[in-house]
Image (tube, helix red, strand yellow):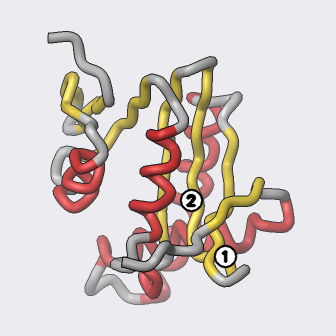
Amino acid sequence: MALLTAGLRAATPADDPFLRHLFLDSRRAEFTGLPESQLDPLLAMQYRAHAADRRARHPRAETFVITSADEPVGSVTVDRDGGRMHLVDIAVLSAHRGRGIASEILGELVRTTEHATLTVWRLNTGARRLYERFGFQVVSEQFGYLLMATEVDG
């Protein structure tokens, strides 16, 4: 298998329109059947709430734009503390999914940290399978969300 060429660059304020588009792209399928006239305002409101919640919960987190062939195709947000990393969010545009981009980025993040954690919706089985491939195990569950970690005390 050929090596992928996904890269990372620090997100800047100029990336805000892309990050909003990425959020809308990743959530649109959750609301099939809702008219566009209702969907766009709902997703815009969710984006604002998501961004505010992420800033409040992870004020030191850094967001990076995932690139492929120098084009933005996704983003990843991580909160690092020494050798520990919490994966706050990772998303790839629907048109670029299934190409191993998220796997490549996740593999590099796990390889370069001593201990990684993340939270995922329990019913997001595709994401859970991806995380399990990189050694994440369920630590706990709360309100339908799973806390997963690369090192679990037995």
Q: Nearer the viewer, mark 2 or mark 1?
A: 1
Q: What residue lies at 45% left-to-right and 40% top-to-bottom?
A: 110
The label on residue 99 is none
Q: Position of residue 105 (x, y in %)?
A: 50, 57
Q: What residue lies at 24% left-to-right and 19% top-to-bottom?
A: 152
For label 2, the residue is: 47
Looking at the rendered structure, the kind of residue marked 2 is Tyr
Q: Position of residue 116 (x, y in %)?
A: 43, 30
Q: Position of residue 40 (x, y in %)?
A: 52, 78
For label 1, the residue is: 72
Number of numbered discs on residues: 2
Looking at the rendered structure, the kind of residue marked 1 is Pro
Earlier in the chain: of badge 2 and badge 1, it is 2
Q: Secondary structure at mark 2?
A: helix
Q: Residue furthest top?
A: 154
Q: Residue 73 appears in which quarter of the rendering?
A: bottom right
**Left or right of residue 57: residue 35:** left
| Residue 98 to residue 48: above or below | below
Q: Residues within 10 Å of mark 2 (few under 14, many from 20)?
A: some
